Amino acid sequence: MFNTSLFSSRSLLAACLGLLIGFVVVAPATAQEAVIRKNIAERLPEFPKIDEVSKTPIPGLFELRVGTELYYSDEQGNHIIEGQLIDTKSKTNLTEARINKLTVINFAELPLKDAVVWKNGTGARKLVVFADPNCGYCKRFEKDLQQVKDVTVYTFLYPILGGDSPEKSRDIWCAKDSSKVWLDWMLRNVTPARMMGECDSSALQRNTAMARKYRINGTPAVVFEDGKRVPGAMPAEAVEKQLAASRGKS
């Protein structure tokens, strides 16, 4: 595996920060793209395949996109930078903003059949939560969600915390009434009954692969109908506000 830390250049990155103006506007790299690709491929054959080369707001600095990973290079491919681009005026993490755009989630394409589902009221409004059953913030968020009216909540079990999270997720998913067992555990601390025998828990592996694809690295993580993502728990009032905004856009 390519060790990108060998090519980190914090001093060069820091020198570039003061030159940033506004948000990243990614423009096609024209003549320099071939040069960058050729030099990096020849000098670093272990470097992963570059999917896209784009200009950044910094003259002479180019973005290298590898899947949803971002690196930066000079116009000759002589140096590679691994790190974050920060707009010091607006205090905006431009690298993060770009990755968020690359990993935007199309709500309509989510495999909701792999989720634990419950609803309040009409259930007309929808949101998705990636949650680990042993996540304390997830439990707090689940309690707050009970205050939200007319919502359907799709929970993708994402056992990321280790310990008995995978086993507990399996016990919940394989229960006869997974929604009830999930809410009993999250709201009332009723331990899920241990699942005995065979059960198709492949949904948990699919959930984990999907979370990694979308770079969801913690729980809870919330996705609204318009694709907006929010890392971490939200108060019920904030959920209500975003649900209303998302319904207007979707």
Image (cartoon, rainbow, N blue to C red):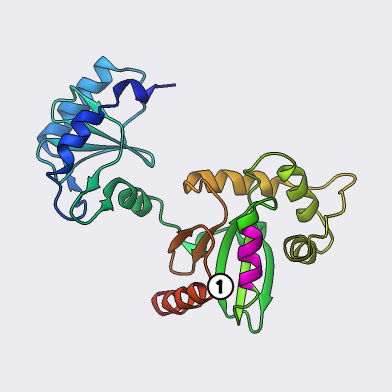
Q: Residue at x 65, y 55 (%)?
A: 136
- Which picture quadrant has residue 246? bottom left
The image quadrant where one finds the C terminus is bottom left
Q: Is residue 184 left or right of residue 62?
A: right
Check disc 1 and report the residue beneath it: 126
Q: Quadrant of residue 145?
A: bottom right
Q: Secondary structure at mark 1?
A: strand
> For this rendering, which residue is in front, 53 or 228?
228
User: Residue reaching furthest right?
Assistant: 196
Q: Residue 186 in the image: x percent, y percent?
A: 72, 61
Q: Is residue 141 left or right of residue 61?
A: right
Magenta stretch bounds = 138-145
**Main secondary-structure element of the magenta-colored stretch:** helix
**Residue 51 is a magenta residue:** no
Q: Is residue 154 visible?
A: no
Q: Is residue 163 left or right of residue 27?
A: right
| Residue 113 percent location from the top left of the image | 66, 60
| Residue 143 highlighted magenta (yes or no) | yes
Instruction: Quadrant for residue 37, please give it.
Output: top left
Q: Residue at x 29, y 26 (%)?
A: 8
> Is residue 236 in sight in this rendering?
yes
Give the image location of residue 230, x and y in percent.
Answer: 46, 60
Number of other residues with Cα within 10 Å of mark 1, as a class: few under 14, some 14 to 19, many 20 or more? some
Residue drawn at (90%, 46%), measured in percent from left and top?
196
Image: 36 above or below 178: above
Residue 213 location in percent, x, y? 49, 45
